[in-house]
Amino acid sequence: MAIREEQAKHVATLAKLSFSEDELHQFTEQLGEIIDLVETLEEVDTTDVALTSNVNDEINVIREDQPLNGTDRNTLMKNAPESENGFIKVPAILDERESEA
């Protein structure tokens, strides 16, 4: 499936990626190749193939949970570049433009 650069640019914007014109061209080609691969996989007949949730017969051996005291919050916050009300403050990742998408 051919994908247009405008579509690839839209996907990049949703993923908060920015590309130069050369990079956008390369990204468009790579995204098109991925879509082609998925379309090829959709053509495979899996009618008589049993569902598989795990291909490995080994069973995980997990240790029993043992509660431990955590690190003091104030000590942890000393490593945070910015905090507010006992929480680590990070930049916003969503904005109003995304609610329109």
Image (spheres, helix red, strand yellow):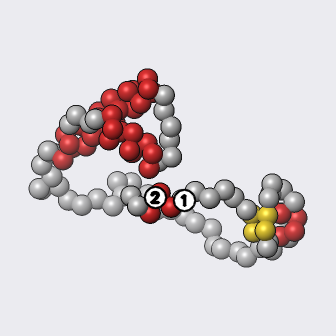
What residue appears at the point 41 percent right and 30 percent down from the top-left corner? 24
The residues bearing labels 2 and 1 have C-alpha atoms spaced at a distance of: 7 Å
Amino acid type shown at disc 2: Glu
* Percent position of residue 94, x then y: 54, 59
Quadrant of res 69? bottom right
Which image quadrant: the N terminus? top left
Tell me whether the residue at label 2 lies in contact with that at label 1, contact meaning CB atoms closer than 8 angstroms: yes
Amino acid type shown at disc 1: Leu
What residue appears at the point 43 percent right and 42 percent down from the top-left corner? 12
Q: What crowding class fits label 2: few (fewer than 14 Cα within 10 Å), some (14-19), or many (20 or more)?
A: few
Residue beneath label 1, please? 94
Q: Residue furthest bottom?
A: 67
Callout 2: SS: helix
- Marking on residue 76: none
Which image quadrant: the C terminus? bottom left
Residue beneath label 2, please? 98
Q: Residue furthest top?
A: 22
Q: Is residue 81 left or right of residue 62?
A: right
Q: Is residue 81 above or below residue 35?
A: below
Q: Is residue 70 visible?
A: no
Quadrant of res 89? bottom right
Q: What crowding class fits label 1: few (fewer than 14 Cα within 10 Å), some (14-19), or many (20 or more)?
A: few
Foreground: 36 or 94? 94
* Percent position of residue 11, x then y: 39, 45
* Percent position of residue 22, x then y: 43, 23
* Percent position of residue 91, x then y: 66, 56
